Image (spheres, rainbow, N blue to C red):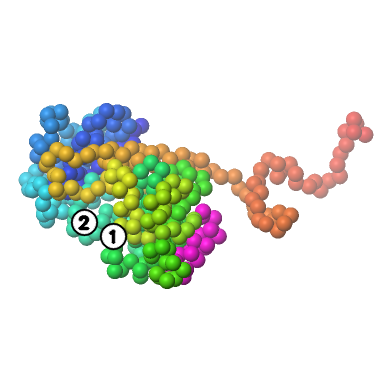
Amino acid sequence: MKPIIAITAGDINGVGYEVTIKALLESHMFELIRPVIYGNAQVAKQHIQTLSEEYRNITWNIIDDASQSKDGRLNLITCYTDNTPVQLGVSTPEANKAAKASLEHACRDLKEGKVHALVTAPINKEALGGGHTEWLETCFNGDASLNGVNGGSLMMLCSGALRVALVCNHVSIADIPAQITEERILAKLTLLNQSLIRDFGLEKPRIAVLALNPHAGDAGLLGKEEQEIIIPTIAKANEQGIWAFGPYASDGFFGTGHFGQFDAVLAMYHDQGLIPFKTLDMSGVNYTAGLSIVRTSPDHGTGYDIAGKNCADPASMRHALYMAVDVLRARSEYDELRANPLPFVVRNDGEGKPRREFIDFKTTVSRQPSTQSPQLSEAEN
């Protein structure tokens, strides 16, 4: 069965509909997924009128429930009224309300198991009072997600082998230092390591940790966070079996291509990680690690400046759809392989180091000492 992918149309005044339609109508997409768009067909038609002729004759499969979706069709669930005003390139309260309604409907279907993964087109952050990542973290992880610790999520930008995750997501520069704590960094490193293993199939991932201050603090001359917080946290992560290295000064790390030696990078704050990432590739994917569900998104915003001009590049949305399928498959394989693990006991080896000794029930039973004297056969006699 093809995975059913929920796609929220995003801000109706931005490029969400455009990149979604363009990406879905590319060759082979319907062979990989069964898409369900959460939006409105009449609003979509207004966007289609701004596109080239090849998109003008789209036929929608309007459904009331994701269970009614069909393969090879543009399935659409109506989430707001036909007369919702479209004002391309402008942020409006109506657009924010529509974007939130789409997301809430899609998330209800995710929780009920009607769809398998979520791909979100860009929204204006005013719609949710913050970004998608923070809203989804609360929606699926609940109050335990406080400050990104104990059940939190992780914002990660992905492009090929380059993955950049963040300690602080959408946070004012002035507020960042207060959030650079050992607890928070270790929580993000743990989430990143777990995601790289389960979601990306990397057995022992190598993670580079960036410094907060220029020149990694220059031995305390330019800031003490590296020596007092980041370096001790990396050491603690290493003790827990996480291969974390650093801290590295961001400019030299990306400028010399050093990032190619690692499976992922943990940046301290948004622009420190995302400026070099987007300079290298603007068609990457925003992935939210640490959630119970799979969520991806294009790595760009609403694109108000180009909305309605038929020039939005669907590459990032296409890659977001592909990644949703890839992560679903990787998680399924990971969970299946570990569904019935062999029982084991921990014993010390000859040097006093703990080691796992797996229990073979047949062997264990056959090796149980007998309380009776051994009976020898005639041949043994």
Label 1 element class: loop
**Identity of the residue drawn at 12% across and 40% down:** 309
Q: Determine whether the residue tagged by mark 2 lies in a helix, strand or loop.
A: helix
Residue type at tag 2: Lys
Asked whether residue 290 is in view, the answer is no
Between circles 1 and 2, the one closer to the viewer is: 1
Question: What span is colored magenta in the figure?
Answer: 225-243
Cα distance between the residues tagged 1 and 2: 10 Å
Q: Quadrant of residue 128?
A: bottom left
Residue at image mark 1: 170
Please provide percent x and percent y for residue 138: 31, 58
Left or right: where does residue 1 sit relative to residue 18?
right
Is residue 211 depicted above or below 326 in this figure?
below
Residue 310 visible in rendering? yes
Residue 125: numbered disc = 2
Hey, which quadrant is residue 187 in on the image?
bottom left
Task: Please tell me which residue is depicted at 38% across the width and 53% down the height of the picture.
Answer: 165
Instruction: Residue 118 in the image: state x and y as whole percent.
Output: 30, 45
Residue 77: image tag: none
Residue 350 drawn at (x, y percent): 74, 54
**Disc 1 + disc 2, Cβ < 8 Å:** yes
